[in-house]
Structures are given as C-alpha cells and as structure tokens.
Image (cartoon, helix red, strand yellow):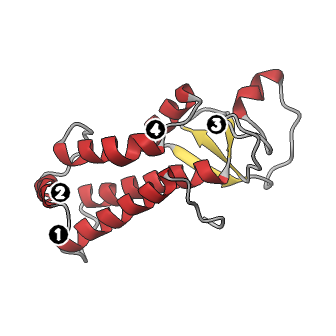
C-alpha cells in the first residue's frame, strides 16, 4: 500500500500539473528526495546544478571523447578526471556536466552522476505528464512510476549506484 496522502497529492497535482516546487506534491518530493540527492559539499555548484536540472539545461557527457586541453588555473573549480567538482574528493570521474550556456565543464564522480541522473529522470517524467505526453498510463500507473523514480533517488542518496548508469 502506498502513502495515501502522497497519492492524493499526486492526483490533485495531475489534474492541474505545475512545475512549481511549492505545490504540496512537489514540495514533499523536494524535501525528501531532491534536496538530499543534490546536496554536495560544494554548495554553490550544487545549487547551480539543481537550477539547471529544473530548467532542463544540464548536460552530462562521458569524459574521454574530447582532447585534453591544457586548462587555465581558473579551471581548478571544475575538478578533473581524478577530482570530483561537486565533492572535492579525489575520485575517478568518467563523466562531466555542463550547466546551461556556461562553457565550463565540471567533472563528476559516478556517485554524483547517479544522484544527478536519478533527479533528472524524475523531472523528465513529471514534465512529460505536465506536457500531456503520458497517454498510455492511468493515474495509478503514473503514481507507481513516480514511486519507482523516488526509489531511484533514495538509492542514489544513500550512495548506491550502478557503475554502468
């Protein structure tokens, strides 16, 4: 059995879908899943990541498809193949992100990538609902899909990640 209050909040939201984070349905998910998932020690960058995810302007790409350029000292904040820009930790970073129109790339560890990806997947799905693109599912199926996406965020938040993701 599901959380009935969340189910009812979802039903209300689905009748008039909004991306406004203060609506009861999204507010709960922001507090319980999204904020915890996108909390990193480099908090300014973490805020910029959340904003880019919300605006659908974040891109993730594998490292190694581009020539290594000799970077200016200012790029230290962006991490590198062996340093995660979001945590500041020495980790092997196989992906990098770009936020909006910025020309900066930020190297991220698999742990951070899974967290960001799980939140992006949630946003993608609720955007599809908001845009009326989810036609094959009834409200119950949509709700269970939302719960599945929340589960992914919870796993990511706890540090589980699929190496291949």
Query: Which one is earlier in the sequence, the residue at label 1 or at label 2?
Result: 2
Query: Which one is earlier in the sequence, the residue at label 3 or at label 1?
Result: 3
Name the quadrant of the C terminus: bottom right
* Few, some or many residues within 10 Å of mark 2 (<14, 14–19, 20+): many
Q: Above or below — where is 115 with respect to 38?
A: below
- The residue pinned by badge 3 equals 87
* Label 3: element kind: loop
Query: Which one is earlier in the sequence, the residue at label 4 or at label 3?
Result: 4
Residue 94: x and y in percent read: 73, 54
Question: Do tag 2 and tag 4 residues touch (Cβ < 8 Å)?
Answer: no
Distance in Å between CA atoms under marks 4 and 3: 15 Å
* Few, some or many residues within 10 Å of mark 1 (<14, 14–19, 20+): some
- The residue pinned by badge 2 equals 10
Point 13% across, 51% down: residue? 16
Distance in Å between CA atoms under marks 1 and 4: 27 Å
Instruction: Place residue 24 in its image quadrant.
Output: top left
Left or right relative to 100: residue 154 = left
Farthest residue toward the top? Answer: 74
Q: Is residue 19 visible?
A: no
Q: Nearer the viewer, residue 54 or 111?
A: 111
- The residue pinned by badge 4 equals 50
Question: Do tag 3 and tag 2 residues touch (Cβ < 8 Å)?
Answer: no
* Label 1: element kind: helix
Question: Do tag 1 and tag 2 residues touch (Cβ < 8 Å)?
Answer: yes
Distance in Å between CA atoms under marks 3 and 1: 38 Å
Query: Which one is earlier in the sequence, the residue at label 2 or at label 4?
Result: 2
Point 58% across, 31% down: residue? 41
Distance in Å between CA atoms under marks 1 and 2: 9 Å
* Label 4: element kind: helix
Q: Nearer the viewer, mark 3 or mark 1?
A: 3
- The residue pinned by badge 1 equals 139
Residue 137: x and y in percent read: 23, 75
């Amino acid at each position: 059995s599901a959380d009935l209050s969340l189910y009812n909040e979802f039903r209300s939201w689905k009748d008039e879908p909004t991306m406004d984070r203060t609506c009861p349905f999204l507010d709960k998910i922001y507090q319980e899943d999204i904020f915890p998932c996108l909390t990193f020690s480099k908090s300014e960058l973490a805020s910029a990541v959340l904003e880019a995810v919300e605006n659908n302007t974040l891109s993730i790409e594998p490292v190694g498809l581009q020539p290594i350029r000799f970077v200016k000292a200012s790029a230290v904040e962006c991490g590198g193949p062996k340093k995660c820009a979001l945590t500041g930790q020495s980790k092997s970073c196989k992906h990098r992100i770009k936020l909006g129109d910025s020309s900066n790339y930020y190297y991220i560890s698999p742990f951070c990538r899974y967290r960001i990806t799980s939140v992006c997947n949630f946003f993608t799905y609720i955007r599809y609902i908001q845009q009326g693109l989810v036609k094959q599912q009834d409200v119950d199926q949509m709700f269970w899909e939302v719960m599945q996406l929340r589960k992914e965020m919870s796993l990511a938040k706890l540090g589980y990640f699929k190496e291949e993701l």
